[in-house]
Image (spheres, rainbow, N blue to C red):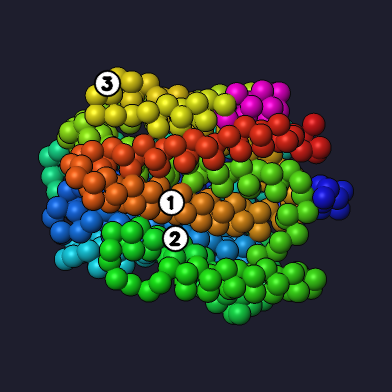
Amino acid sequence: MSDIRTTSDAPTVSAPDHSVRNRLVISLLLVSAFVVILNETVMNVALPDLMKDLGIEPSLGQWLTTAFMLTMAVVIPTTGFLLQRFRTRTVFVTSMTLFSVGTLIAACAPGFGVLVAARVVQASGTAIMMPLLMTTVMTVVSAASRGKTMGNISIVMSVAPAIGPTIAGAILSVAGWRWIFVLVLPFAVGALLLGALRIPNVNEPRKVPVDVLSVVLSALAFSGLIYGFSSVAEVAQGHPGVPVWIPITAGALSLAGLIWRQLVLQRSDRALLDLRVFRSRGFTVAVLMMAVAMASMFGTLILLPLYLQTVLGLAPLATGLVLLPGSLLMGLMGPIVGRIYDKRGPSPLIVPGTIVVSAALWMLSTLGHATPVALVVLIHVGLSVGLALTFTPLFTSGLGSLPARFYSYGSAVIGTNQQLAGAIGTALFITILSTVGAHELAAGGTNTAAVQAGIHAAFLCGATLSVLLIVGAFFVRRPVQEG
C-alpha cells in the first residue's frame, strides 16, 4: 500500500489562501456546521427527563442519538456525488433547508415517534454539511496552511457535540426539552438565509452518474449494521423484536455487495464511494484511528450524563456545567494544535494525545457513587485535551494523503466512518450498560447500583479499545506533499 498522489492530480479549482472569497466561504461553512453538528448530542442530557416524560427506557431513548448518526451514515456516502455534481451554494442551501425543517418538526413533535423522525430529517442536512466543509477547505487552502484551518474544523467536529450537553442542561434548567429545538431554529434559519445570499461557488460541477444500486446497498448496509447493534440493548432488557443476527447479517452482506460494486464502478470513475482512497496508507491509518476515537467519544458523551444524574444525583444544568470546561478547552486548543501541525507534523501531537485519551478512559472506568464531582471534571478535561491533540492531525494527514480529485470521496469516507463508529460506540456502551445493569438488578441490587456497574463495565471496554489508538499513533506520518 502506498500513497496515491501524482503530480497530475493538482486541484482543478483553487484560489489564494488569503483571498476574501475563501475566508468568507470557510467562515460561513464553519458557523453553519457548528449549528448542525451541535444537535448530534444535544439530547443526551435531556434523555433522563425524556425517558420519564414519555415512559421509555435507555435502550429506546438512545435512538434519538443513534437514529441521527444512522441517517448520517446512510446519507454521507452520496455526498461524493453531490459535491461533484452541484455547485457549492446549491449544496449548502439543500443542507440547511433540511436541517431547519427537521428542527421545526422536532420543536412541534407530539411524541417520541415524530421526534425520532424529525431527528432523521435534521441528520439528512447535517450529513451533507461536513463533507462540503472539508472538501471546500482541501480545495481552496494551500497544503502549508491546512493544519490551522483543520484546527478550526476540529472545533466543529469535536467541540460542537461535546458542548451540546452543556447547552441542553442550561435550557432544561428553565424549560422543557422541546425548547432545545425552539432556540436552535432561529440560528439554523439565519445561517440558511445568510449562506443563500453570500456563499460563493468555489467548485466546477461536472456531470457524474449516480448508481442507484450503490445507494440502495449503502442504505441497507449501514442501517442494517447500526440497527442490529442498537437492538442488542433492547433484547438484553427482554424486549421482543427481530433477532439481532438478522439485521447484522443483512447489513454485512449489503456492505460486501457495496464494496464489490464500488470496485467495479471505480474502474470507469463511476463509483458512488471511490474506494481507491484506501490505497493511501496515511488515509487508511487515519480512518481506522478515527473510528476508535469516535466510538469512545460518543460512547462517553452518552454515558457521562447518565452517570452524573443517576448515580451522583446532579441536575441537568449541573451536568452540563461539569462537561463545560473540557469542551471549552478543546475549542481553544483547536487552532493551536493546527499551527503546531503545520510546523512540526502529526507525531508530536498524536502520540501524547492518544496516551492521554487512553489514560482518561481508564480513569473513567473507576467512577463510583462516592467519586468527587471535581475529579470527574478533571478526567473529562484530560479526555478533551487528548482528543484535541488527536483529531486535527488525523483529519489533516488523512485527507492530505489523497490526490485532489479524491477529496470529496475521502471526505465522504471520513464522515461515514465517523457516524458509523459513533453509532456503534453508542450502541456498544449502552448495550454493556443495559446487560450488566440487568444482571445487577437480578442479583438484588438497586437501580443506582445497576447503572454504576453498567457504566464501569462500558468504560472498561472503551479503555481497552483505546490502547489501539496508542499503537496506531506511531504509524501516522505527515503527507509527502506537505513536507
Q: How many labels does the image show?
A: 3
Q: Is there a contact, CB below 8 Å, between mark 2 and mark 1? A: yes
Q: State which region is magenta.
A: 341-354
Q: Name the residue under label 1.
A: 428
Residue at the spot of label 3: 372
Residue where numbered disc 2 is placed: 229
Query: Between disc 2 and disc 3, whose residue precedes?
Result: 2
Q: In this view, does 28 lie to the left or right of 476?
A: left
User: CA–CA distance between discs 2 and 1?
Assistant: 7 Å
Which mark, by number, is residue 244?
none
Res. 408 image quadrant? bottom right
Most distant residue in the right direction: 7
Q: At label 2, which amino acid type do we have?
A: Phe
At a point 18% along the width and 42% down the height, the residue shown is 446
- Residue visible at 15% across and 38% down in the picture: 173
Q: Position of residue 294 (x, y in %)?
A: 50, 44
| Left or right relative to 433: residue 274 | right
Main secondary structure type of the part rendered in magenta? helix
Badge 3: residue crowd in 10 Å (few <14, some 14–19, many ≥20): few
Q: Is residue 70 left or right of residue 77?
A: left
What kind of residue is marked 3? Answer: Pro
Ranked by sequence position, the earlier of labels 3 and 1 is 3
Q: In percent of the image, x 64 and y 77: which residue is there?
A: 211
Between the C-alphas of marks 2 and 3, the distance is 33 Å
